[in-house]
Amino acid sequence: MMKKLKYWICGFLLPICASGSLYSEELPPMPEGPLLLTSAVPEMLNPDYWIDRLPEPDKVIKTPEQLKKFNKEIRAFLPEQRDIFTMETSRSGAGIAADLKNVFSAVRGRKLLFEDDAPVPKSFFDERVKPVMAAEKVPERIQYRWGAAVRAASVRSLPTDVKLLEKPGDIEFDMLQYTQIKLWTPLAIYHASPDGEWLYIQAPYTRGWVRSRDIAVFSSREVLKQYVETPKFLVVTGESVPLYRDASMTRASLRASMGTLLPLVSVSESAYVIEVPVRQDGGKASAVKAYITIGSDVTRGFPAYTQRNIIRQAFKLLGARYGWGGMYNGRDCSGFTHDVFLSMGVDMPRDSKQQGFVGTQLGHFKIFDDAEYKATILRSATPGLTLLRMPMHLMFYLGEVGDNFYVIHSTWAERYSMTSDDKNRINQVVVSDLSLNGRSRIGSLFDRILSANEVN
């Protein structure tokens, strides 16, 4: 689930693992996968197992024109979703300053820990964060600047790279991490830190602080739009694909993750020629050519929106790393579903609660109650199109086999104790039935389902 708070001139020639991720420390190894959990059997780890059970897997759910209309409806229904190319071009600075102060106060008021488990003092926020945020320097009227991410980039609630934890040892859960935006993500720039190292931005599905080194600023929104909304584009349909700086494709410099859209220049026998944004001196944007090998897991335009394609997309991420808010270039539960739908042309929100409101509502439930009603709804749900939401978690519904309901989801751990918070680390995308966690005091996945919705 995306974290929410209540309360190349110089940039393109990079090592293949480079991204805007803040996290490079060595972590405990993931359990070797793909894992077999609950009653799942090996054949269930093949997408064809689930596709072959469907009566019309190739029926088009929505045409490209219907998807465009659907995306407009999503943006209209969910105010957190913003169309960068139709939003206003300026606004009062008072609202942005108030937002900055509210988030700062909310985080400052929490009991958080550094990575060494030492408590975070209030002075950390007052002395190291507040001056960088500089809310008092937001002008009375903001004229937006327009930019794009030159690589995958972390979006933070506060302008600091310091990781802050909620529980001792929880190094994989940074409470300041909102999400990670993709290469070419368009955005509006509201504010900058006094030293120019941080930008406060609005992206299509998130707002927060990003490192300025990860953003290239275009001369106008119209110029940015020509690249981002070009009719000729590639969609990354694999977990990720390498992008090469040279036509001989010997120097991989970036990786583009599932759902990334790349402006297409031309196609040769050996390569797709695309354009990527680069950050020049002073932050100004330019676009340069890059190359993707023919045969890479990409498509020209979006794949047809069918159950077969959705399920295949989801299973391409089987075993992929879990990453809270995109940490370690992984995907949390809603990051997983977001990327799958994004690669199909659905402009999904990033937060799990918001995703639960997209499409047709099948049912809403109470935790530990409504078991018969839940089962009835699940038996009528469309595999591949249905999302199941529970507190802090989201899952793709795959179908019923025997007396068990199955899902594919990105999850960090399985709880198994009635007396403690003990857990088995999973940390990846898995197939399981809804009895997972059923031996714990918090209850099974089935027990805790709050809603079901079809993205149709």
Image (cartoon, grey):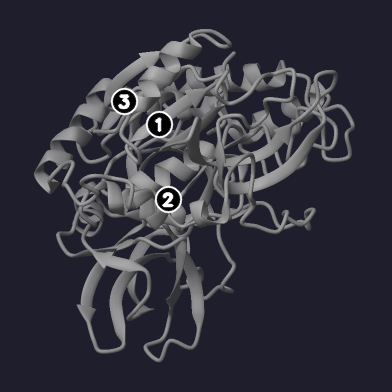
The circle on residue 387 is 1
Question: Is the residue marked by circle 1 packed among few (<14), some (14-19), or many (20+) residues within 10 Å?
Answer: many
Q: Amino acid at mark 2?
A: Ala
Q: Position of residue 300 (x, y in %)?
A: 22, 66
Quadrant housing residue 433? top right
User: Looking at the image, is mark 1 or mark 2 earlier in the sequence?
Assistant: 2
Q: Nearer the viewer, residue 169 or 101?
A: 169
Q: Nearer the viewer, residue 366 or 213?
A: 366
What distance separates the C-alpha of mark 1 from that of mark 3?
Answer: 13 Å
Q: Nearer the viewer, residue 37 or 29?
A: 37
Whether 29 is drawn above or below 189: the answer is below
Question: Is the residue marked by circle 2 packed among few (<14), some (14-19), or many (20+) residues within 10 Å?
Answer: many
Q: Amino acid at mark 3?
A: Ser
Residue position for label 2: 314
Q: Is residue 339 visible?
A: yes
What distance separates the C-alpha of mark 1 from that of mark 2?
Answer: 12 Å
Q: Residue at x 63, y 24 (%)?
A: 444
What distance separates the C-alpha of mark 2 from that of mark 3?
Answer: 21 Å
Give the side of residue 224 with respect to residue 149, left or right: left
Q: Position of residue 243 (x, y in %)?
A: 43, 74
SS assignment at label 3: helix
Question: Is the residue marked by circle 3 packed among few (<14), some (14-19), or many (20+) residues within 10 Å?
Answer: few
Q: Residue at x 50, y 84 (%)?
A: 251
The circle on residue 380 is 3
Q: Is residue 147 visible?
A: no
Give the side of residue 352 with respect to residue 31, left or right: left
Q: Position of residue 370 (x, y in %)?
A: 48, 9
